[in-house]
Image (tube, grey):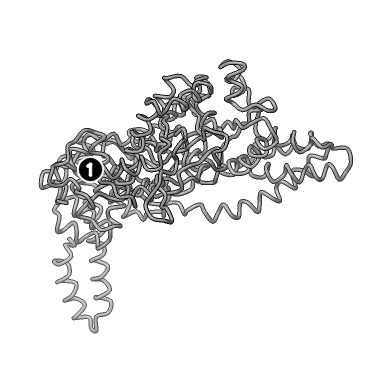
């Protein structure tokens, strides 16, 4: 595969919507000309992740991750650089030159697995509409799904034959090993491959960009075991972080600033039919901490909507334990016993299902109600109830909120507030010790010199023409070697060679070492001061003058030391005479 030409990279950079791209993973809020959100690359509760769309740069002031749209995609999706480039190129409609397109084996593993899934999706969709799909169509109709939902969620049918998909992949030159790695095929002990999901209704599981990464398969006949069969884990599909219904929910989550969590594919679609778009389903697993982190980056509020039976309530409580410490607010909707969202919708309609979601009580209220349900009359019962509630209350990350919940638990169990609060504090203290281990150090406080250099970089990034005010070699000498010096010199070079403000960051990236590049990203992404051209020129002059003065003072100091060490009065006088010329002292 040939190299991707610089013009192509430039065309993609110019067109790509970085805020939209990052926004699929992180809820971003405008802050000046930048956007801020919770970093997807480290665990944090207050936003230090910054995106600057004008410069096409993101930077995290917590963990230091930074870069452009390509870097974001390689890191968040684990793509190679060419894969990220091709993915963004196809998204923003920039053609990749023939010579740089991958041939056969050269495509990355991600792309090949995605291709296999896309082929499977086409086959399954076609089969659902065919004669062979009649039973599957009947089944979906009986579950209340219309043509619109089937189309929108891409529901299909994996044909009964053992090798239909294997054949289809072969026809498209996709090796069986890739089909197997994607979780679509399974190897027979006797050799050859068979279709894993054959004879099942298929639910494509998509990533935030709408590409199929896995499938969930629902059995059609009673003798098919298990009832639900999901694709196994693959480089595209990690159950601990995957959600079903993600691309359809992104807009709704942004608008409503909340996520409704359900347990099944039909439940997810039931919420869609009830007009609740901000819903996600886990894919055959319980909620994990990874799910929690990904939810927190998208919204502060999570509504759990689990089945109205004991298993459903227990799942809700477990989810609460995971989501509260992540810093999320959690509500738990109580469905009538024996109901799931799908059956409630079928029996009582959209309005009833919406009401259950809107009126969901706080998750901790549910936990307290569960804990006191066996009774709270004897001291032992009170202690039992508190043992169940206190660890959950202790996980509330906001201190004032935590105290309020401790008081509520005391009231419900008939115990003294002070005792409950003390127990909660005890547990919370233990939890906070853990917390400090994962919270990264904040940015190191910069020296005054570094702050001035940062200002200089920001002024030049906005107004490259101001570089004309600076004599690069003598200025370089007055800074001294550091990442800042490297950055400033490269920037001066780029400015004087006529790069425009829009191209500066891209022009510099390849020329800098890691530390200097990270500094550049931090400064380019930061909201920072906005300079008028005249202000920028003045700032540049001031900073250069400051460094100049500092250098002269240092020379004087060095010279005085020399004079002090002089062996004789004559030598000292000679030194003073020569020095007043050399150091420019008047
Ligand atoms: Zn970070």
Q: Is residue 352 above or below residue 518?
A: above
For the view shown, which residue lies furthest in the bottom direction?
Answer: 567
Count of numbered circles in the view = 1
Quadrant of the drawing holding the C terminus: bottom left
Is residue 207 left or right of 560 when viewed as pictured? right
| Residue marked by disc 1 | 461
For the point 32% across and 44% down, which residue is it?
73
For the point 54% across and 56% down, which residue is it?
437
For the point 24% across and 47% down, which residue is it?
542
For the point 56% across and 35% down, which residue is it?
263
For the view shown, which residue lies furthest in the right direction?
Answer: 378
- On the image, which quarter does residue 367 sit in? top right
Seen from the viewer's position, the closer of residues 115 and 224 is 224
- On the image, which quarter does residue 52 sit in? top left
Residue 481 point in image, percent of width and height: 25, 63
Residue 15 point in image, percent of width and height: 22, 34
Is residue 384 left or right of 9 when viewed as pictured? right
Work out whether residue 99 can be spotted: yes
Is residue 89 left or right of 226 when viewed as pictured? left
Secondary element at image label 1: helix
Q: Is residue 7 above or below residue 561?
A: above
Residue 559 point in image, percent of width and height: 23, 71
């Amino acid at each position: 595969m040939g190299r991707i030409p610089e013009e192509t990279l430039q065309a993609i950079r110019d067109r790509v919507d970085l805020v939209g791209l990052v926004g699929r993973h992180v809820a971003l809020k405008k802050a000046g000309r930048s956007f801020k959100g919770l970093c997807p690359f480290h665990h944090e509760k207050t936003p230090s992740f910054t995106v600057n769309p004008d410069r096409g740069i993101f930077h995290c002031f917590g963990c230091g991750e930074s870069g452009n749209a390509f870097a974001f995609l390689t890191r968040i999706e684990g793509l190679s650089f060419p894969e990220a480039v091709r993915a963004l190129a196809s998204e923003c409609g920039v053609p990749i030159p023939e010579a740089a397109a991958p041939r056969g084996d050269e495509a990355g593993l991600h792309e090949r697995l995605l291709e296999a899934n896309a082929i499977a999706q086409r086959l399954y969709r076609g089969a659902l509409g065919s004669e062979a799909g009649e039973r599957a169509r009947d089944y979906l109709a009986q579950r209340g799904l219309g043509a619109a939902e089937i189309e929108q969620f891409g529901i299909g049918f994996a044909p009964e034959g053992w090798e239909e998909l294997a054949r289809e992949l072969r026809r498209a030159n996709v090796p069986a090993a890739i089909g197997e790695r994607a979780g679509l095929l399974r190897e027979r002990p006797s050799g050859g491959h068979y279709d894993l999901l054959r004879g099942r209704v298929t639910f494509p599981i998509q990533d935030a960009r709408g590409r199929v990464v896995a499938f969930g398969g629902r059995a059609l006949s009673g003798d098919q075991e298990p009832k639900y069969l999901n694709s196994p884990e693959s480089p595209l599909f990690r159950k601990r972080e995957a959600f079903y219904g993600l691309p359809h929910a992104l807009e709704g989550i942004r608008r409503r600033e909340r996520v409704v969590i359900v347990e099944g594919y039909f439940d997810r679609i039931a919420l869609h039919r009830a007009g609740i778009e901000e819903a996600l389903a886990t894919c055959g697993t319980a909620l994990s901490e990874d799910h929690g982190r990904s939810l927190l980056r998208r919204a502060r509020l999570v509504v759990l909507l689990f089945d109205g039976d004991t298993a459903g309530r227990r799942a809700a409580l477990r989810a609460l334990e995971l989501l509260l410490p992540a810093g999320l607010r959690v509500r738990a909707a109580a469905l009538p016993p024996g109901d799931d969202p799908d059956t409630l919708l079928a029996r009582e309609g959209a309005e009833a299902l919406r009401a259950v979601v809107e009126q969901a009580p706080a998750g901790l209220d549910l936990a307290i109600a569960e804990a006191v349900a066996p009774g709270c009359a004897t001291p032992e019962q009170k202690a039992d109830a508190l043992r169940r509630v206190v660890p959950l209350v202790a996980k509330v990350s906001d201190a004032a909120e935590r105290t309020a919940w401790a008081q509520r638990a005391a009231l419900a169990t008939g115990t003294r507030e002070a005792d409950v609060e003390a127990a909660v504090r005890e547990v919370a203290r233990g939890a906070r010790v853990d917390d400090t281990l994962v919270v990264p150090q904040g940015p190191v406080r910069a020296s005054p010199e570094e702050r001035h250099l940062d200002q200089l970089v920001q002024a030049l990034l906005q107004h490259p023409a101001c570089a004309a005010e600076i004599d690069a070699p003598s200025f370089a000498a007055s800074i001294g070697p550091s990442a800042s010096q490297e950055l400033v010199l490269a920037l001066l070079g780029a400015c004087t060679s006529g790069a425009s403000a829009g191209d500066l960051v891209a022009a510099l990236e390849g020329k800098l070492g890691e530390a200097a590049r990270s500094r550049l990203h931090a400064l380019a992404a930061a909201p920072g001061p906005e300079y008028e051209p005249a202000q920028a020129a003045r700032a540049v002059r001031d900073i250069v003058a400051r460094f100049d003065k500092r250098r002269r003072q240092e020379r004087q100091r060095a010279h005085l030391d020399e004079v002090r060490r002089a062996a004789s009065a004559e030598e000292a006088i000679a030194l003073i005479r020569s020095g007043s010329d050399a150091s420019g002292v008047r």
